[in-house]
Image (cartoon, helix red, strand yellow):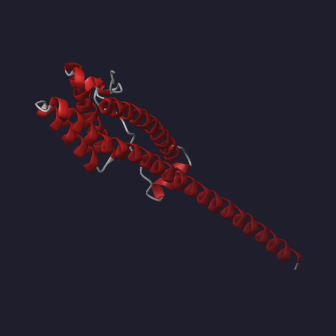
Amino acid sequence: MEGLLGLGGFACVVLLALGGLFVLVAGWFVLTYNGLVQLRNAVKNAWSQIDVQLKRRYDLIPNLVETVKGYAGHEKETLERVIQARQAGIAASTVKDQAAAENLITGALRQLFALSEAYPNLKANENFLKLQEELASTENRIGFARQYYNDAVQTFNTRQEVFPANLVASMLGFQPAEFFEIEAPGQREAPKVKF
């Protein structure tokens, strides 16, 4: 009889140990999953911050184009490029498409600002100067938002790749987020705004 109780007690200890191990593994799984969800949401939040700044930029561009049009209306091709680039930015649906569109916008704005050198009256126009200043400020905000977004992406992607969190990430279908990268080497500088 004592042998049976000893065996039963041992089985009970083993069951408790297995139950405790299961609770630990389940707890780790839940914490890892929740951490990945938080990081994914941080990436989404960071992207929305970029989106806010891009919207601000898109809102400024038509005003800038109209101001330039009054002084340099015959520079139609440059003005059209700016508007087309803006439309591409608005229509972009992925991070990669958005980065490509932003490269187009930056190049088009550089050409637009270069026009001010050829038109002294435009260069002295108070409206144009205010719009240039607002756009330069917005460019800085976009730069900070991009940095914040890419930091959030790095944290999220790293968490998905390290062991043992990578097991949870792959099991539950987490996908790496895309970095917001500037592709063309000549586009790695902010647009120069000259007064």
Judge whether residue 114 can be spotted in this image.
no
| Quarter of the N terminus within the rendering | bottom right
Residue farthest to the bottom, as pictured: 1
Q: Residue at x 40, y 36 (%)?
A: 138
Judge whether residue 76 can be spotted in this image.
yes
| Quarter of the C terminus within the rendering | top left
Quarter of the figure with residue 16: bottom right
Q: How many numbered callouts?
A: 0
Q: Nearer the viewer, residue 171 or 104?
A: 104
| Percent x, y of residue 71 | 18, 30
Horizontal relation, residue 14 to residue 82: left or right: right
Horizontal relation, residue 76 to residue 97: left or right: left
Q: Residue at x 73, y 69 (%)?
A: 15
Quarter of the figure with residue 130: top left
Horizontal relation, residue 69 to residue 101: left or right: left
Horizontal relation, residue 79 to residue 168: left or right: left
Q: Residue at x 33, y 21 (%)?
A: 194
Q: Nearer the viewer, residue 9 or 107?
A: 107
Q: Nearer the viewer, residue 123 or 24?
A: 123
| Percent x, y of residue 129 | 33, 29
In the image, residue 73 sits, relative to residue 123, either above or below, namely below
Q: Residue at x 45, y 39 (%)?
A: 145
| Percent x, y of residue 115 | 21, 24
